[in-house]
């Protein structure tokens, strides 16, 4: 669209023209969705963020000033800020949930015999994993990283983290079954 067309559409939106707003949505939603998705890394959440962003755009269209920048840049900033707010909100919620879970585990352990991963032989099993899989398990299960955080930390693709994690868990399961069978045989 040409600048004159865009300015005309924006003026109609400022007057409350919903069909003009639909034109803005149709022309920019894909690009704004891409930005939201890049920030929140979840398609459903990105869709919600985009909807929230468009509600803010509709509610605040009167504050748009074309002498300060294009409508796309203005809308992009709203979408980006909305996505960042959502990301921070989710991260804060995850930290709080992790702290609550940690407190619950601590309470259980203090009320019963202390559990040590060495007592049940987990470290021995983990040490039998290939180095790349062992590293993934240590970060995910002992250091509390999410798969995305681990991908960022180790600078490897998220798919690689998921593949190594799946392979490691399968191997650990097989090793654990073997350990149980060996224990049963020895103790019968």
Image (cartoon, rainbow, N blue to C red):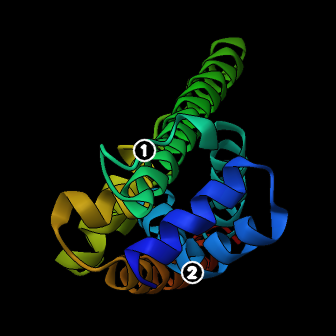
Q: Are marks 2 and 1 in contact (CB under 8 Å)?
A: no
Mark nearer the viewer, 2 or 1: 2
**Secondary-structure class at tag 1:** loop
Q: Position of residue 186 (x, y in %)?
A: 58, 72
Disc on res. 23: none
Disc on res. 144: 1
**Secondary-structure class at tag 2:** helix
Q: Residues within 10 Å of mark 2 (few under 14, many from 20)?
A: few
Q: Quadrant of residue 147?
A: bottom left
Q: Residues within 10 Å of mark 1 (few under 14, many from 20)?
A: few
For the image shown, how many numbered marks are present on the structure?
A: 2
Q: Is residue 90 above or below residue 169?
A: above
Q: Is residue 176 visible?
A: no
Q: Is residue 10 visible?
A: yes
Ranked by sequence position, the earlier of labels 2 and 1 is 2
Q: Is residue 140 left or right of residue 112?
A: left
Residue visible at 63% across and 50% down in the picture: 53
Which residue was labeled with disc 2? 27
Q: Is residue 147 above or below residue 130?
A: above
Q: Position of residue 1 (x, y in %)?
A: 46, 85
Residue visible at 29% across and 67% down in the picture: 151
Q: Is residue 46 above or below residue 180?
A: above
Residue 140 or residue 188, whichever sits in front: 140
Spatial separation of the CA atoms under disc 2 and disc 1? 41 Å
Residue visible at 28% across and 80% down in the picture: 157
């Amino acid at each position: 669209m040409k600048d004159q067309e865009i300015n005309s559409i924006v003026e109609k939106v400022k007057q409350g023209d919903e069909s003009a707003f639909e034109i803005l949505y149709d022309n920019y939603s894909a690009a704004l969705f891409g930005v939201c998705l890049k920030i929140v890394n979840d398609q459903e959440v990105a869709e919600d963020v985009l909807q929230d962003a468009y509600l803010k755009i509709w509610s605040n269209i009167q504050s748009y000033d074309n002498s300060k920048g294009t409508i796309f840049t203005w809308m992009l900033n709203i979408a980006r800020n909305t996505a960042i707010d959502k990301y921070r909100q989710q991260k804060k919620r995850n930290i709080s949930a992790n702290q609550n879970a940690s407190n619950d585990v601590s309470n259980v352990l203090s009320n019963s015999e202390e559990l040590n991963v060495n007592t049940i032989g987990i470290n021995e099993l983990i040490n039998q994993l290939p180095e790349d899989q062992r590293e993934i398990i240590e970060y995910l299960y002992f250091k509390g990283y999410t798969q995305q955080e681990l991908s960022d930390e180790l600078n490897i693709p998220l798919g690689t983290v998921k593949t190594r994690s799946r392979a490691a868990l399968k191997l650990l399961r097989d090793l654990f079954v073997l350990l149980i069978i060996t224990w049963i045989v020895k103790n019968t």
